[in-house]
Structure formats: C-alpha cells, structure tokens
Image (cartoon, helix red, strand yellow):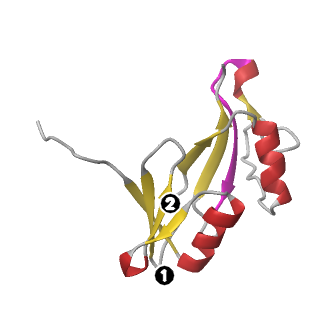
Amino acid sequence: MVAYTFVFSGFAVTDIDAARTFYRDTLGLTVNDESMGHLSIDLPAGGFVLAYPKPDHVAATYTMLNLEVADIDAAVDELAGRGVEMLRYDGMVQDARGISRGITTRQGPDIAWFADPSGNIISVLQNAD
C-alpha cells in the first residue's frame, strides 16, 4: 500500500485577487500567497486547500467545500451581513435564510449553500450534537 505523507485538495478560481479577498475577508479564513500565483487557504481543524488561477474555469455544480459551524443561524446571518447570498435550490425545502433544516427532520445536517466569486459552491453546516 502507498504510504501517503500528507493530503490536501485544490480548486480553480477565475480571479485569484477576488478569491483572496473573499476567503480571507468575507469568510475569515487564513489565506497565504504561494508560488505561481496560488493561494493556500488554511482550514480550521488543520490542513489546507490550494486555490489556483484558471481563467477559463467552469464552476462545478456540486459543493466543493463544507464549513462546519456550531450555530448555523448566526453563521448565515453574519455571512449575509458581509454580502453573501445563500443559494436556493428547486425542490429543496429551505427557510427564509436559505437553510435546509436536516437536523429536525433527521435527514442530515442543517445546511446552507453559497458561491465564491468564481461560482464554486460552498456550504455552512451544523451537525446534530
């Protein structure tokens, strides 16, 4: 079996400066400039993801980064106060804030989705205790 020494993920963005501002100033994550115009975004529990510029980037249609929070209502309100708009999905029950309440229905976490400036889908979610 291969002995992996470290694991990280990466994703493309159309504008590295917009990504730096969004992930650092809007989401409050630590962002470091790396070589070749890449960004290293530190994850709260350790590790990082690499954001790299790709001018012809096409955003995926799925969630590529999940950010767990202790209080989803407070997190969504704070993000909305910073100009983040929650995504709405046809056929999905979401409340006025854009939160799908999975905890009370026992169908998963409470979760809300939004996009970064490149259209990459991110979620904030709160798991049951």
Question: Is disc 1 placed on a helix, strand or loop?
Answer: loop
Instruction: Name the kind of residue labelled 1 in the image.
Output: Pro
- Viewer can see residue 54: yes
In the image, residue 109 above or below residue 11: above
Q: Is residue 121 left or right of residue 34?
A: right
How busy is the neighbourhood of tag 1: few (under 14 within 10 Å), some, or many (20 plus)? few
Residue designated by label 2: 41
Nearest to the eye among marks 2 and 1: give it: 2
In the image, residue 29 above or below residue 123: below
Which residue occupies the foreground of this view, 70 or 59? 70
Please tell me how many numbered marks the rendered image carries. Answer: 2
Residue 66, horizontal then vertical, whole percent: 57, 45
Looking at the image, is mark 2 or mark 1 earlier in the sequence? Answer: 2
Q: Residue at x 66, y 19 (%)?
A: 129
Q: Which quarter of the rendering shows the N terminus?
A: top left
Q: Where, by quadrant of the figure, is residue 73 drawn? A: top right
Which residue occupies the foreground of this view, 98 or 2? 2
Disc number placed over residue 65 in the picture, else none: none
Magenta stretch, residue numbers: 105-116
Extreme residue toward the left, this view: 1
Q: Residue at x 42, y 49 (%)?
A: 47
Q: Residue at x 44, y 54 (%)?
A: 48
Q: Is residue 69 left or right of residue 58?
A: right
In the image, residue 34 above or below residue 73: below
Residue 27, horizontal then vertical, whole percent: 67, 57
Disc number placed over residue 55 in the picture, else none: 1
Instruction: Name the kind of residue labelled 2 in the image.
Output: Ile
Residue 98, horizontal then vertical, whole percent: 80, 44
Q: Is residue 91 left or right of residue 21?
A: right
C-alpha separation, residue under disc 2 versus residue under disc 1: 19 Å
